[in-house]
Amino acid sequence: MANSYFGKYSLAATLSCAAILVCGTFASRPATADETCNSPYMSNLIKGQEDFAYVWTLGVRGLGDGFDKLVTVDVNPSSKNYGKVIATISVGARGEAHHTGFTDDRRFLWAGGLDDNKIYVFDIHSDPARPKLVKTIGDFAGKSGLVGPHTFYALPGRMLVGALSNSKDHGGATGMALYNNKGEFLSKYNMPTTQGGDGYGYDIGVNPAMNALLTSSFTGWNNYMMDFGKLLKDPSAMKHFGNTMVMWNLKTMQPEKIMQVPGAPLEVRWSLKDGDDWAITATALTSKLWLVKKDARGEWQAKDVGNIGDPAKVPLPVDISISADGKGLWVNTFMDGMTRYFDLRNPEAPKEIYAKHTGAQANMVSQSWDGKRVYVSSSLLANWDKKGADDEQFLKLFSWNGKQLQEQWSLDFYKLKLGRAHHIKFGAKSSQDVS
């Protein structure tokens, strides 16, 4: 698990070497590659049919054991267990399970709790059908002063963890914490609060070829742990959301450009198409797509390039998934339960060309390597999910033929006494399925 070589060097030196090594790989990677939200430092992308979907699931008091758990679903249509839950691992606590991320060798999956600040490390390579919990990292808040471990972004031999808040006041000022693959804390990087920086954090996206690390911004613990209805009625609380994206120098880990992107820009997705030099994000509160690209002077700029649904109705975009060739983008909007597809062939002017109601509430969206399969889950945050009959909790698989989504199966996570289905990652049976 550990990479002793990189352990001898500073992050800057590590990234400098890695950027050179990965630059060529990134620039020449076939446009057919997917799993587009994974770190470019991961070498083991699944190119064929994924065998498993790992779903990081929030525990619900009184439902099953009530604890957060990693749920493994068999998603290979040739399997007798196709579309069924084949394993669950309860972590024995309920800490607002949220996002996950693979280590650079794809042998381990890190999963975080936004409330209890614990990070769980699952072995997914020894038996991919039955992951094992091998380590719990409990020093995140104590060592970094940050809370709400959100994004787990693989670097060579290390894991960069983007946080949402801080242990001092549970507000929005936050940063990133660096761990090695052994789970040992190394250092932290504060989000900038000067020269236009607002200190908020959310997602991380790296483009090694451009020596670029891009971060986005959301809100602090005080808001994301508040009841959503109460939050919307609290004008003071609604002022505490991020309105910036930060471009960092990847080698030095210093912020270079702070861009104003109003309305909580969330997921960061770099285009993987050869020659492309841009990233895209969606703003949750203003329902916009924003393009991040260098201008004619070579400076990074963020530009509003289109609406998602009707911004006046606040559809609340919560997740995006870019196609491998950079020509299409899936967007899930939570409030109206829509899964939308945008034509990105001109990223300066994206066009919504398809939309389907996939649930009473739709949160995460993940597409397969070839773009033919689209997975949708339901839970946003425990206190933000809808109430009553609209509180559907599911994992659904849709096929995509380029024109429409067709539901293949749906798992009701409440009926199965599992909890609230959130983040989705893919797994494969053996190394023959990945490259």
Image (cartoon, rainbow, N blue to C red):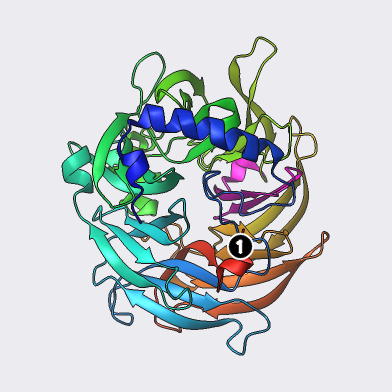
Which x, y percent locates residue 7? Answer: 31, 40
Query: In the displayed image of the protein, which residue is found farthest to the front?
Result: 5
> Dot 1: what SS?
loop
Residue shown at 59%/26% (left/top)?
210
Query: In the displayed image of the protein, which residue is found farthest to the top?
Result: 297
- Magenta residues, start to end: 310-337
Which x, y percent locates residue 30? Answer: 73, 47
Crowding at dot 1, Cα within 10 Å, few <14 / some 14-19 / many 20+, comes out as some
Horizontal side of residue 204 vs 66, given as left or right: right
Name the foreground residue: 26 vs 426. Answer: 26
Q: Is residue 317 magenta?
A: yes
Which x, y percent locates residue 403? Answer: 83, 60
Residue shown at 61%/54% (left/top)?
35
Quarter of the view holding residue 396: bottom right
Residue shown at 25%/38% (left/top)?
186
Residue that carries the numbered disc 1 in the rendered image: 434
Name the foreground residue: 226 vs 272. Answer: 272
The number of numbered discs placed on residues in the rendered structure image is: 1
Residue shown at 69%/53% (left/top)?
340
Q: Quadrant of the N terminus?
A: bottom left
Query: In the displayed image of the protein, which residue is found farthest to the bottom?
Result: 80
Vertical comparison of 87 with 180: above or below:
below
Horizontal side of residue 87 vs 138, given as left or right: right
Q: Give the residue type at disc 1.
A: Val
Q: Is residue 15 magenta?
A: no
Examine the rendering and report whether any part of residue 381 can be seen. Answer: no
